[in-house]
């Protein structure tokens, strides 16, 4: 029962309680008159009883009312001189005793009522608290259930994605291999019969199929990055960059590229994923400086915000218009026509996904024909323990 | 080149079979090849039952095994081969379309001898098949009990 309900009930019954008190005194008065009629000696007990009953039922207020009324009635009707409120000196002690006794009863009753009220208040509060607790528990249980459902959904969609990627990697590559294979065979078989135009058609089929193959491979590795667990450790970025550059240099023989590799620190991350980041960024730099007579590629590092360090790859190549900067990192987004610079539009999306998985950020600066700089942030090595603890 | 080990190809796609045979032909390896079109057929060949019950005795010098096969898939075939006392020594090369790490790990755990992803590029594909054929059918000394063509 809510406390306000109790209070209103008490307010409603106030009239009743005082009325009861008056009625008790009236009955006591009647009894006393009867006692006097039969010449009983003690006339006070009915009043004492009335006060006790009024106190028991009505509490402090009705008790005091009963006391005053009883005292007045007794004094007026029964204590000599009768029919006057004056008190003879010989009755004074017993009158005072009567009053004191009645007051004592009233104060006991008051105390009892207060304690009772306190108790019921406490009980109500407790009940409210229990109900709230129960509601909260229900809520937590509901949320938990929701979370479990969500996790199950996520797991099943992850599984679906995995089997999708699996079947893509199996089933999409097979027909592609056949397109390439049989076109090559046709080219070989009918080389003498085909005119230049037909030869060109076959070459186009081959080029397109190759490109599709590259696209499928890139997409698969992109989706694999999303699913694979990162295996983080301390990574020597400088060594990593040197490895990547020396690998790429094998493909760029004959081109005079001015490499500038600054000292790079050790960072905390997934080595093979970070290698992929550099491979993408550096091969992009190589690709987009193709038309420069003196290509320059710089790889360096600056202190980033907080616990991160910011690594950059800068080139003096074709660059890009800054108003399209937000499109750079999207999947399949390309800012150059395919006949200018080839590509699948997945490289920078892969870079972004890897860096995001390391809790870092990517950004790019550039201008058309002024070169481009790609920045990414990775956690510093000295905060690796904190990071590791946070990501657990 | 006087003796040739027999090559057992397990491949369901006829185009892949044709491309593989074309590649092997360039090294005159094609006549030492037996082609089976699913896992069940491959096992029938190995156990000399069904359509192969009349074939002469002996195991192939190498089995080129695709993974995605009708009826019994490649990994299942590999598992059976490795658990059979008479077949477990056959060199098995998985030749598959997929780069899936899961497949690779499972294959190696089951004791595959090599794992080759079919290249999309035709020249690379031809080279890969050729080299596989030459290595396993010619260069490699097959385990005792293998069929040899003369």
Image (tube, coloured by chain):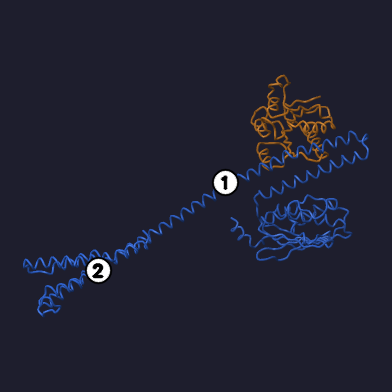
**Crowdedness near tag 2: few (<14), some (14–19) or many (≥20) residues, C-alpha within 10 Å:** many
- Image-based side of A149 in relation to A235, left or right: left
* Colour given to chain A in the rendered image: blue
Of the 4 image quadrants, the one containing the C terminus of chain A is bottom right
| Chain containing mark 1 | A
Where is residue A152 drawn, in percent x and y?
57, 46
Location of residue B11 by image quarter: top right
Is B88 in front, or is A105?
A: A105
Distance from Cα at disc 2 to Cα at disc 1: 67 Å
Element type at marker 1? helix
| Chain containing mark 2 | A
Is A159 in front, or is B146?
A: A159
- Residue that lies at the very extreme toward the top in this rendered image: B54
| Residue occupying the point 35% across, 60% down | A123
Where is residue B32 drawn, in percent x and y?
79, 27
Mark 2 or mark 1, which is nearer to you? 2
| Residue occupying the point 69% across, 22% down | B48
**Crowdedness near tag 1: few (<14), some (14–19) or many (≥20) residues, C-alpha within 10 Å:** few
Location of residue B62 by image quarter: top right
Of the 4 image quadrants, the one containing the N terminus of chain A is bottom left
Answer above or below: position of A177 versus B85. below
Is B18 in front, or is A246?
A: B18
Query: Which labelled disc corresponds to residue A152?
Result: 1
Location of residue A255 by image quarter: bottom right
| Disc 2 and disc 1 on one polypeptide chain | yes
| Residue occupying the point 86% across, 55% down | A290
* Colour given to chain B in the rendered image: orange
Query: Which labelled disc corresponds to residue A62?
Result: 2
Element type at marker 2? helix
């Amino acid at each position: 029962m809510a406390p306000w309900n109790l209070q209103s009930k008490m307010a409603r019954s106030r009239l009743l309680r005082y009325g009861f008190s008056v009625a008790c005194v009236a009955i006591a008065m009647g009894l006393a008159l009867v006692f006097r009629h039969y010449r009983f000696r003690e006339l006070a007990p009915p009043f004492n009883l009335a006060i006790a009953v009024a106190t028991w039922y009505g509490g402090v207020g009705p008790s005091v009312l009963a006391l005053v009324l009883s005292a007045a009635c007794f004094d007026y009707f029964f204590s000599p001189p009768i029919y006057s409120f004056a008190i003879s000196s010989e009755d004074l002690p017993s009158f005072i005793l009567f009053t004191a006794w009645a007051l004592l009863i009233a104060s006991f009753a008051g105390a009892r009522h207060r304690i009772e009220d306190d108790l019921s208040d406490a009980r109500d509060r407790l009940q409210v608290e229990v109900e709230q607790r129960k509601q909260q528990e229900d809520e937590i249980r509901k949320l938990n259930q929701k979370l479990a459902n969500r996790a199950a959904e996520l797991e099943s969609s992850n599984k679906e994605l995995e089997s999708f990627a699996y079947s893509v990697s199996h089933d999409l590559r097979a027909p592609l291999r056949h397109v390439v294979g049989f076109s090559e065979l046709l080219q070989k078989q009918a080389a003498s019969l085909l005119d230049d135009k037909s030869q060109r058609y076959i070459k186009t089929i081959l080029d397109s199929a190759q490109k599709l193959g590259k696209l499928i491979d890139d997409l698969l590795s992109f989706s694999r990055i999303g699913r694979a667990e990162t295996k983080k450790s301390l990574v020597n970025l400088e060594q990593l960059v040197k490895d990547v550059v020396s690998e790429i240099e094998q493909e760029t023989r004959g081109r005079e590229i001015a490499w500038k590799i600054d000292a790079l620190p050790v960072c905390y991350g997934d080595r093979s994923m970070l290698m992929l980041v550099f491979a993408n960024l550096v091969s992009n730099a190589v690709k987009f400086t193709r038309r420069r007579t003196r290509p320059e590629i710089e790889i360096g590092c600056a202190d980033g915000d907080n616990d991160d360090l910011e690594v950059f790859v800068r080139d003096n190549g074709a660059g890009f218009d800054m108003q399209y900067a937000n499109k750079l990192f999207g999947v399949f987004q390309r800012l150059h026509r395919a006949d200018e610079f080839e590509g699948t539009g997945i490289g920078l999306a892969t870079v972004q996904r890897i860096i995001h998985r390391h809790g870092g950020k990517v950004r790019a600066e550039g201008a058309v024909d002024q070169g481009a700089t790609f920045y990414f942030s990775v956690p510093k090595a000295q905060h690796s323990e904190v990071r590791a603890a946070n990501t657990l | 080149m006087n003796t040739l080990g027999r090559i057992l190809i397990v491949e369901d796609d006829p185009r892949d079979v044709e491309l593989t045979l074309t590649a092997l032909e360039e090294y005159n390896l094609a006549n030492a090849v037996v082609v089976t079109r699913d896992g069940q057929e491959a096992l029938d060949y190995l156990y000399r039952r069904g359509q192969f019950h009349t074939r002469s005795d002996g195991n192939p010098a190498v089995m080129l095994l695709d993974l995605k096969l009708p009826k019994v898939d490649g990994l299942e075939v590999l598992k059976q081969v490795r658990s059979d006392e008479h077949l477990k020594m056959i060199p098995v090369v998985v030749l598959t379309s997929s780069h899936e790490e899961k497949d690779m790990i499972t294959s190696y755990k089951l004791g595959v001898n090599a794992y080759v992803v079919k290249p999309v590029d035709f020249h690379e594909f031809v080279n890969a098949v050729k080299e596989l054929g030459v290595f396993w059918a010619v260069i490699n000394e097959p385990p005792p009990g293998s069929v040899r063509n003369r």
